[in-house]
Image (spheres, rainbow, N blue to C red):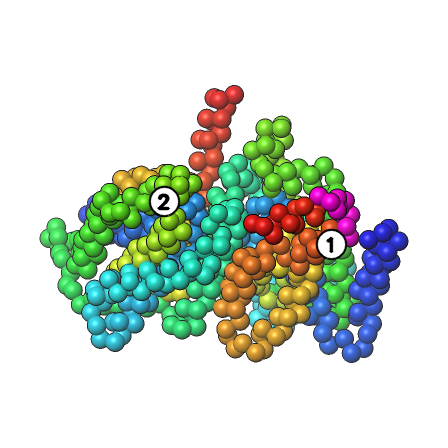
């Protein structure tokens, strides 16, 4: 905790941590939004969520190694992951969609392991990242530095989110997805092909994750086995925000990003992942206590 | 199966298991056979939660690691000071008399088991009030967090691991000794679980699996039963972990103790493969998996873990009943279920029409 003193004596550091955290948190918001989408529409908790993020990162990295600027990786990763998601739905997920949660959790757990090990075999276990070549901004007399790529990433996140909201409000498919989320059976009676809706939802979730992964590989690092942390983060954000609450998801994601940066600074970077998992347990315990209190009132 | 056949089967299995170390050509593989009992323990303890109660636990490996570390620390601190031990581990091995060794092992296993029960009770009473998916994701994080913690904690050797004392010569070879210890442990676990499943406890956790809301509404203290089930599962896993640390001699925090990607995944797969929610399923699943594993490791060159993930997906999606579950659906009479032939015929024809 020796770093606490630094924070007290030089408050400008906390500005730095806050900015970093909020920018990283905006990427978490994308993955979490995808998870909330799947959870709400298909009632599936997708444990392989984080692995799509990492896979998107590797797609971008492959482009980067081929000499293409990684920013092009954002749309490419989204498209590639869209088809990966579609394929996974067609092969596995449609068989578990209307079965109980127990089966779908186990199935996505298996997919998660499969993807992790595949990426490990193909890309190696090393930590890698793609250099965007953009400069750094200096604020507050050069005491706070912000990589420009992080600002670009924020812009991409905003563009993607706004287009998603518009998609769900305006387009035919978006309306069909919302109808299916409300009541799948009624939607089917109204002539909506729910199977196609599910496939679309799953593929879109993978695409969103892929875009997020492209941003992760430019602003941070990726590694085959780090996907689980993104699954846990997404889950945590959705649990705190609640389903179908976009503003809540954004707020929780930004908060988580900032909290993580402060924790990594205070406890040491090696405990950052430990902090994420610890926070998950704490959040679930608090949630259970709250629910218990409500139950007692009902009695 | 009738009573006489059952007894004969049990007796035959017991004799076979006891005789394995005496067969000359099996002697070199005794450690492998000891591993088989560990695998069976893994699958059986996972099945308490995953099969009988319908709660996926992806972090049961935590108890394995806790038991292993607790036993190793007790064995270390009981007869050595830390400096002595550091010197010994660097050069020659620590020598213990058989009595000292066994006392340390037993005491360590006891403390490890208690610790596991404590952790399961404290965490369980908090998390298990929530429904399955919260528990599943929470345990997923727990396994990793435990590994990270153990890698950073100097008292238990941090990332460089911990060395357990060697088996004294007077207790014989490593192979037969650990074979018998794990055999006894597996048999005790099996019998305890058999007894538990046959009684009120088994009915209660099965009710929770089938419909938790109804069970709750009928006055069952669901959270209490769930927590106890997790404690039972953790206790036996911790005992197994304690002995396992002594078998492999060197405890690595992420590769041996909290080995999520290997043991942690295997236990889920083995239980489902054999048939979750049945008494014999995990035993059979673990045996089949362990025997075929030889194939996986030898012929797949690093792709075995990819195949493992694929296998989980295939088994969960296409073969969710598992081996025993499938047999049970095929020949229900053999499993002591009454079958109304007429009703069955009607049901089958209805299913055919759908």
Q: Secondary structure at mark 2?
A: loop
Percent of width and height locating residue A205? 34, 53
Which residue is the extreme one toward the right?
B4
Q: Residue B338 in magenta?
A: yes
Asked if residue A235 shows in the view, the reply is: no
Location of residue B17 (image quadrant):
bottom right
Residue drawn at the location 59% of the way across and 45% of the way down: B54
Above or below — where is B299 with respect to A226? below
Above or below — where is B45 with respect to B302? above
Task: For marks 1 and 2, give the one nearer the viewer.
Answer: 2
Q: Which residues are magenta?
A: B333-343
Task: For the residues labelled 1 and 2, say whether their Cβ atoms are less than 8 Å apart.
Answer: no
Q: Is residue B265 left or right of residue B184?
A: left
Q: Is residue B27 left or right of residue A92?
A: right
The residue tagged 1 is B331
Residue drawn at the location 79% of the way across and 70% of the way down: B21
Q: Is residue A73 left or right of residue A40?
A: left
Mark seen at residue A191: 2
Percent of width and height locating residue A233? 37, 49
Percent of width and height locating residue A106? 52, 54
């Amino acid at each position: 905790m020796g770093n606490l003193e630094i924070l007290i004596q030089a408050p400008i550091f906390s500005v730095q941590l806050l900015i970093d955290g909020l920018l990283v948190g905006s990427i978490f918001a994308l993955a979490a939004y995808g998870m909330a989408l799947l959870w709400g529409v298909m009632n599936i908790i997708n444990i392989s969520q984080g692995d799509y993020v990492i896979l998107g990162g590797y797609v971008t990295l492959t482009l980067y190694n081929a000499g293409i600027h990684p920013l092009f990786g954002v749309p490419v990763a989204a498209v590639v992951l869209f088809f990966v998601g579609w394929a996974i739905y067609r092969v596995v997920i449609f068989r578990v969609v209307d079965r109980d949660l127990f089966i779908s959790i186990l199935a996505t757990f298996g997919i998660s392991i499969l993807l992790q090990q595949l990426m490990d075999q193909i890309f190696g276990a090393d930590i890698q990242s793609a250099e965007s070549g953009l400069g750094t901004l200096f604020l507050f007399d050069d005491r706070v530095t912000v990589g420009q790529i992080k600002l670009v990433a924020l812009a991409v996140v905003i563009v993607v989110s706004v287009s998603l909201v518009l998609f769900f409000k305006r387009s035919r498919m978006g309306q069909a997805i919302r109808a299916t989320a409300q009541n799948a059976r009624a939607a089917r009676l109204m002539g909506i092909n729910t199977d196609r809706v599910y496939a679309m939802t799953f593929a879109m979730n993978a695409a969103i994750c892929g875009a997020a992964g492209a941003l992760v590989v430019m602003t941070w690092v990726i590694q085959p086995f780090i996907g689980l942390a993104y699954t846990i983060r997404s889950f945590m954000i959705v649990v705190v925000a609640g389903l179908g609450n976009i503003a809540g998801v954004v707020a929780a994601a930004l908060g988580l990003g900032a909290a993580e940066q402060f924790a990594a600074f205070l406890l040491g970077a090696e405990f950052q992942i430990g902090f994420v998992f610890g926070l998950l347990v704490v959040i679930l315990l608090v949630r259970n206590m709250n629910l218990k209190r409500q139950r007692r009132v009902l009695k | 199966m009738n009573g006489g056949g059952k007894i004969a089967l049990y007796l035959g299995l017991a004799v076979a298991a006891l005789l394995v170390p005496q067969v000359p050509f099996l002697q070199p593989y005794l450690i492998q056979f000891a591993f088989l009992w560990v695998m069976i323990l893994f699958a059986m303890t996972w099945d308490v939660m995953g099969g009988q109660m319908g709660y996926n636990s992806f972090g049961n490996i935590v108890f394995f690691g806790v038991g292993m570390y607790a036993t190793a620390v007790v064995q270390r601190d009981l007869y050595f000071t830390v400096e002595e031990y550091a010197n010994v581990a660097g050069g020659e091995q620590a020598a213990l008399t058989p009595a000292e060794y066994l006392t340390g092992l037993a005491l360590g296993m006891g403390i490890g088991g208690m610790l596991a029960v404590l952790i399961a009770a404290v965490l369980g009473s908090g998390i298990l009030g929530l429904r399955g998916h919260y528990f599943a994701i929470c345990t997923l994080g727990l396994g990793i967090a435990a590994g990270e913690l153990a890698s950073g904690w100097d008292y238990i050797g941090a990332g460089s691991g911990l060395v357990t004392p060697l088996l004294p010569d007077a207790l014989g070879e490593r192979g037969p000794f650990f074979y018998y210890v794990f055999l006894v442990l597996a048999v005790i676990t099996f019998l305890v679980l058999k007894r538990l499943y046959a009684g009120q406890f088994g009915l209660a956790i099965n009710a929770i699996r089938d419909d938790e809301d109804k069970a709750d509404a009928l006055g069952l203290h669901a959270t209490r039963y769930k927590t106890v089930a997790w404690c039972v599962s953790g206790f036996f896993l911790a005992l197994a972990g304690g002995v396992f640390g002594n078998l492999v001699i060197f405890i690595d925090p992420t590769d041996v103790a909290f080995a999520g990607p290997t043991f942690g995944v295997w236990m889920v797969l083995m239980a489902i493969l054999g048939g979750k929610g049945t008494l014999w399923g995990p035993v059979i699943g673990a045996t089949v998996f362990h025997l075929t594993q030889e194939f996986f490791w030898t012929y797949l060159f690093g792709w075995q873990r990819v195949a493992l993930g694929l296998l989980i997906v295939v088994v969960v999606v296409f073969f969710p009943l598992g081996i025993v579950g499938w047999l049970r659906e095929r020949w229900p009479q053999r499993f002591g279920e009454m079958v109304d032939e007429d009703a069955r015929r009607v049901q089958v024809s209805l299913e055919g029409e759908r």
